Image (spheres, rainbow, N blue to C red):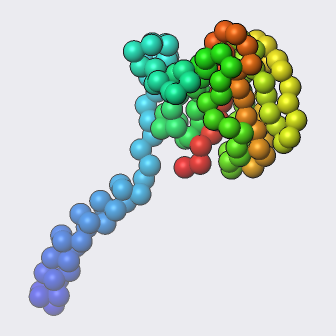
Amino acid sequence: MKKLFLNLILIFAVYYPLLAQNKTDSVKVEKQFTIENCVAEFSMDQAKKTQVGYQFWFADPDFIDGRTLKMSVVAPHLATHPPHKHIEDEFFFVLEGTAEFYLDGKTKIAGPYTSFYCPSNVEHGIKNVGDTELKYLVIKKYQK
């Protein structure tokens, strides 16, 4: 009986830390939100250059749960990419300039303070059709 008891203690001593480690690995650690990481101020130093302008991520896909907020800036008469589709839906919101929105074969030209919703798996695009920079926000939730 003493040998059985010692074996149980040994098994417990060896396997308990492994079980505890697996439990903590599977428990998702909640992000701590502070004023420092909840306020994002634009900085050209942190903007990412693109072939047609630049982008600034106010909230990148890792900030929360895939929800993002990005500003794209496109030079006159250019587009970041041709019309495309993807599983995520998204919103565009024009801050400055003149945009041509493309959705499922149709287009609409609009200026500042205009939003454009792109449903999931529907071909869409945005391009700058003006003579000044186009600045717009992109609001999207990436799949995790």
Task: Answer yes or no: is residue 64 visible.
Answer: yes
Residue 70 placed where, x, y %?
58, 26
Q: Is residue 71 left or right of residue 17?
A: right
Q: Is residue 14 left or right of residue 93?
A: left
Please identify the quarter of the rendering in which residue 53 is found: top right
Is 9 above or below relative to 35?
below
The residue closer to the viewer here, 31 or 92, is 92
Please identify the quarter of the rendering in which residue 100 is found: top right
The residue closer to the viewer here, 135 or 30, is 135
Q: Residue at x 75, y 49 (%)?
A: 121
Task: Answer yes or no: is residue 113 visible.
Answer: no
Residue 139 placed where, x, y %?
65, 30
Q: Residue at x 31, y 66 (%)?
A: 19
Residue 89 placed where, x, y %?
72, 41
Residue 25 placed where, x, y %?
36, 56
Q: Residue at x 44, y 49 (%)?
A: 28
